[in-house]
Image (tube, rainbow, N blue to C red):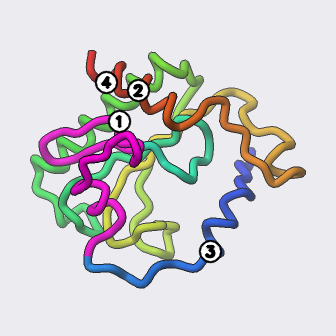
Amino acid sequence: METLYAPWRIEYILAPKMAVAEHSIFTQIARSNDDEANYVIARDRTCYAVLNTYPYTGGHLLVVPYKQTPGLDGLTDEELADLWKLARRCLNALVLVMKPDGFNIGINLGKAAGAGVAGHLHIHVVPRWTGDTNFMPVIAHTSVLPEALTDLAAKLRAALAQ
């Protein structure tokens, strides 16, 4: 078994966390009109997609329901279907724009499972390439993202608009 190390994420993990707010960061982004500043790449009726600002790899994005709920049972069947349909659309856009060799797709339910925003369910879509780990994160504590989030967000918005 191979291990994916992401030591640059320790800065986020150990950083002081804001007090639990009534509205999660995802709810704040959902209510914002500044999609470019927030790296929102798509909005649908019940959910939206946003690039992760603390990515494991380039193109790591999140698919988020507008409804703030900690788990799957808080969504209607329609909202759940919309969430997965947008995840599929995003995956297809990533294939078109970034041409990854594979994907990690998943949900972390609860703080113990690694949910960074435990009170607001979201799907991680992480593109992967054969041999995509290297010495930079392990030795230099540096993540090498091949493209600025603003540029990638623009490309993914265009692909999703097709």
Residue 131, above or below 46: above
Query: Which residue in the protein does label 4 denote?
Result: 160
- Mark 2 and mark 1: Cα distance apart in space: 6 Å
Q: Earlier in the sequence, mark 3 or mark 4?
A: 3
Q: Position of residue 139 (x, y in %)?
A: 89, 51
Residues in magenta, as a range: 23-50
Q: Are marks 1 and 4 in contact (CB under 8 Å)?
A: yes
In the rendered structure, the answer to whether residue 67 lies left or right of residue 146 reads: left
Where does residue 18 sit, x and y in percent of width and height? 46, 79
**Could you tell whether 13 is left or right of 30 in the image?**
right
Question: Residue flagged by tag 4: what amino acid is it?
Answer: Leu
Q: Earlier in the sequence, mark 2 or mark 3?
A: 3
Q: Residues within 10 Å of mark 2 (few under 14, many from 20)?
A: many
Could you tell me how far apart the alpha carbons at marks 3 and 4 are, in whole angstroms? 33 Å
Q: Which of the 4 image quarters holds residue 49? A: top left
In the rendered structure, are the residues bearing label 3 and label 4 in contact, judged by CB atoms less than 8 Å apart? no
Residue identifier under label 1: 41
Tag 2 secondary structure:
helix
Callout 2 touching callout 4 (CB < 8 Å): yes
**Quarter of the figure with residue 154:** top left
State the residue at coordinates (66%, 30%). 146
Up/down of 73 relative to 127, above or below: below
Residue under circle 2? Answer: 156
Label 2 amino acid?
A: Leu
